[in-house]
Amino acid sequence: MSQSVDDRSIPYRPPGRGRRTFALLAGAPIIPLLIIGLFVLAAIFANFLTPYSPTQPNLALRLLPPFWVEGGQLAHPLGTDLLGRDMLTRIMYGARVSLTVAVAVILVAKTIGVVVGITAGYFGGWVDAALMRLADATLAFPGILFAIVLVVALGAGLWNVVLAISLLDWAGTSRVIRGEVLSLKNRDFVAQAKVAGCSPLRIMAVHLFPNIINTLIVLSTLQVGSVILAEASLSFLGAGVPAPAPAWGQMVSNGKAYLTTAWWLAFFPGMAIVLVVLAFNMLGDWLRDVLDPKMRQV
Amino acid sequence: MTRPILEVKDLRAHLMLRRGAVKAVDGVSFDLHSGETLGIVGESGSGKTMMGLSLLRLLPRPAGRIVGGSVIFDGEDLLAKSEREMRAYRGSRISMLLQDPMTSLNPVFRIGNQVAEPLTIHQKLAGRGLRDKVRELLRLVRIPAPEARMSDYPHQMSGGMRQRVVGAIGLACQPQVLIADEPTTALDVTIQSQYLRLLKEIQQETGVAIIFITHDLGVVARMCDRVAVMYAGRIVEIAPVRDLFNNPQHPYTVALLRSLPKLEERAEKLYAIGGQPPSLMNLPKGCAFTARCGLANARCREAYPPQIDIAQGHMARCWRTEEKAHV
């Protein structure tokens, strides 16, 4: 019988895992990664990197300008604040607050968002209606106001800030994920999975979830920026991490009255916020391109 | 004669819409034996796909509902099973090939893992045994270099290859019944021909019974042992394939066969059945084909015709056939 299908094996060798990973990383955006890496290192090793305490006042050294300005000292390269605390030290410890909040919020909010989104999208009907009205209600609230109310009600503190921002952020994610699932669940591969005898839980976890991971990662990295901004806004408004602890937003807030006389009080923490948010957004853009399976190296 | 592997009796499946119930499957009965291929033909919207889906109890939710009848598979009524019990049948003992191979594979998984899925679910295979079985299945559906292909993603394969992979998934647990819902419509003719030959070979090797849903009468003639013609949710004629082509009884079958273009006649215009199939939401009281039938009379409009046996295994539902038989 003549089969036109060739049974001989075609010489084909996929490139090794190591080589593929290298090719992938070679295209990574160096500058954003460098910025994020620097801030992460600073946050983790703040204790070792600076001899000063972020909270101990030293009134003898108050309001020193950055070292390149007349009157500045190299010992305090970015100057000191109203109470004589080293700015660079406070920014490094501030990174700890911002990044902890960002990571924790992303973990909590995305978990809720994904579970709600996939459930609503997959089951549809009244489950969908109920969950999405809940999301709408959350989205309809003015975000920062809601967070302030929550923090005031729960008491200020790092984890309450995390909770407040998480309770705001899940809704957006769940809407996006639900939309994605709605378009995915009518695709034939879901029907194929049903035909193969998969349970709804397995279809959601094994078939749908991997298909939304790209969206999720991109959403997450892009949202790190907005979470850091939200945390900064909360501490700027005084509803964030309480006072002696260094938080960027709170530092900007304290410095704003001295913009004309001691500009570095607000400028450097503001710069830190801008740099981190920008870096995470650029990383998110790159990840989106890389994680698209259609653009993966064949 | 041995007991059929699948007996469908008076199956009714409706789609409950806000505007009313669409009677997509309205009293379908047939038997299917091991190793046999039953073709289901009919035009778009005649309920072929819905019928296939309702055998697996996978009607689109929440609208689709099976409202009556029974599906006896190997002596057990599938309609009486719980959803959990039903899952144990799907993919292991009854399987289905979907219409479009281009979309029925999950884009984010490697081919090997997708073929492995029914095996992990139903046979709890893992590790080396699973890998060997997957390779064997890919070889069964004639994928060249199965070892290398297992780590491919679907987008790295051609349409014909993907359809064969879908076939491998469907056949993974050696099902006794395979429902093939127009598995070749999305493929070009040469690939289609290869694929049909492959299905036939696999059927000879494994003895699987195939329900072949299609609107291509050429494919039916080639693939099937028996053919059921569906119209407006009902089987209007069922016969061994030779009988159906040589001696069609129902006017709809006759019209279907007439609308096949023939090579020897150069017709100016191709024959087409006039009019439209009736709305499945409010079917006429009598035969559903009356509006388009040249032979229809008052009785046809009055009552739905019963099953009339023409010959061994040949049944049609038409009053006029009965008259002819009596004459």
Image: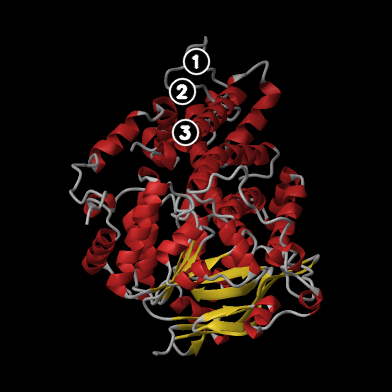
Mark 1 burial class by Cα count in 10 Å: few <14, some 14-19, many 20+: some
Are circles 3 and 1 on residues that touch, CB within 8 Å? Answer: no
Residue A283 is labelled as 3
Residue positioned 68% across, 66% down in the render: A127
Can you name the residue that lies furthest to the top here?
A70
- Looking at this view, is B94 or A29 the one in front? B94
Residue B320, above or below A90: below
Can you name the residue that lies furthest to the front here?
B327
Q: Name the residue tied to disc 2.
A: A76
Q: CA distance from mark 2 to mark 3?
A: 31 Å
Q: Name the residue tied to disc 1.
A: A72
Q: Which numbered mark, 3 or 1, is in the foreground of this view?
A: 3
Mark 2 burial class by Cα count in 10 Å: few <14, some 14-19, many 20+: many
Q: Amino acid at mark 2?
A: His
Rendered-image quadrant of the N terminus of chain A: bottom left
Residue positioned 51% across, 75% down in the render: B239
Are circles 1 and 2 on residues that touch, CB within 8 Å? Answer: yes
Q: Amino acid at mark 3?
A: Leu
Residue A291, image x and y in percent?
A: 43, 40
Rendered-image quadrant of the C terminus of chain A: top left
Quarter residue A226 falls in: top right
Q: Label 2 marks which chain's residue? A: A
Q: Is residue B24 left or right of residue A24?
A: right
Residue positioned 40% across, 90% down in the render: B1
- Looking at this view, is B185 or B222 the one in front? B222
